[in-house]
Image (cartoon, rainbow, N blue to C red):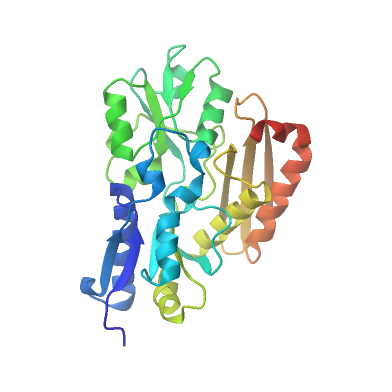
Amino acid sequence: MQTKPFRIGTRGSPLALAQAFETRDRLMAAHGLDDHMFEIVVMSTAGDRITDRALADIGGKGLFTQELEDKLLSGDLDFAVHSSKDMPTHLPDGLFLSAFLPREDARDAFIGRAGPKLLELPEGSVIGSASLRRQALIRRLRPDLSVVVYRGAVETRLRKLDEGQVDGTLLALAGLKRIGRTDVVTEILDPHEFPPAPAQGAICIESRRGDARVGALIEPINDIATFEAVTCERAFLAALDGSCRTPIAGFASSDGTTIRFSGMILTPDGSRHHRVEREGPASDPEAIGRAAGEAVKAEAGPDFFASWS
């Protein structure tokens, strides 16, 4: 019988905390447990502390996870809650993504100050984004716009927008929904023209391999359709060696029988791109994503990837 609280690791942003509390609440409901059986442990990561440079210049996605993963490996945390799109494709030995909550809307939202729609902004408008995928997609659709690196928590980015530092920015619609800020959205972007990041909109749980106690706790809240879709998308990323230095988009959906996947790779300046679509049995999502990655890599050819380095 568990007598001490399960320790849930999370970053300290309002969005990260909302995700941690959603996970806790789902576990309470699944097991009939009181909130005193869970302790939310807030940790600062290097990615939170360093906000004046692009992630690609300071170490990539792992900067949002390393401190939490160190505590997982030491046993100081029972599991950690993350935004799935922040997770590197290769995790430390002994850790894995053990569950995914039901996915929110995976689309990107545009918040415009100089105009409500991305395609209608005045020429030369300044758009702020920390994501190389978003930067490349903006440049593909609007090469006349100026795109600048723009980092920070959601509220920080919105404040900078209000102050006039940029004319518009893009954020994940899922995150805005989770913190109750959809009021700021001026346009929801078409996922065909502006495809989302792999794993966008999905909350994941990271835990230790072989920890049967935590595994039994988490298993009932794992959403199978999200698990299959995100596994496919992460396999696509892995096949392309995806990181914060690479503009990659991808989205999969599963109906329990079949997975349908659509992906895109771009050069950072948005001038060239390649799309790929695949479908296959939901029983092997990793193979579908990997095959899509290998196919688009072969189609693009080695010269395409020179701009990624």
Using the image as rendered, state which of residue 164 and residue 253 is in the foreground. 164
On the question of residue 96 being in view, the answer is yes
As drawn, is 281 to the left or to the right of 64?
A: right
Looking at the picture, how far across and down is residue 135, in whole percent?
A: 52, 29
On the question of residue 281 being in view, the answer is no
Q: Give the quadrant of the N terminus.
A: bottom left
Q: Give the quadrant of the C terminus.
A: top right
Give the number of callouts. Answer: 0
Q: Name the residue furthest bottom.
A: 1
As drawn, is 298 to the left or to the right of 252?
A: right
The quarter holding residue 140 reads top right
Using the image as rendered, state which of residue 80 and residue 74 is in the foreground. 74
The quarter holding residue 158 reads top left
Looking at the picture, how far across and down is residue 69, in whole percent?
A: 44, 61
Using the image as rendered, state which of residue 71 and residue 201 is in the foreground. 71
As drawn, is 196 to the left or to the right of 177?
A: right
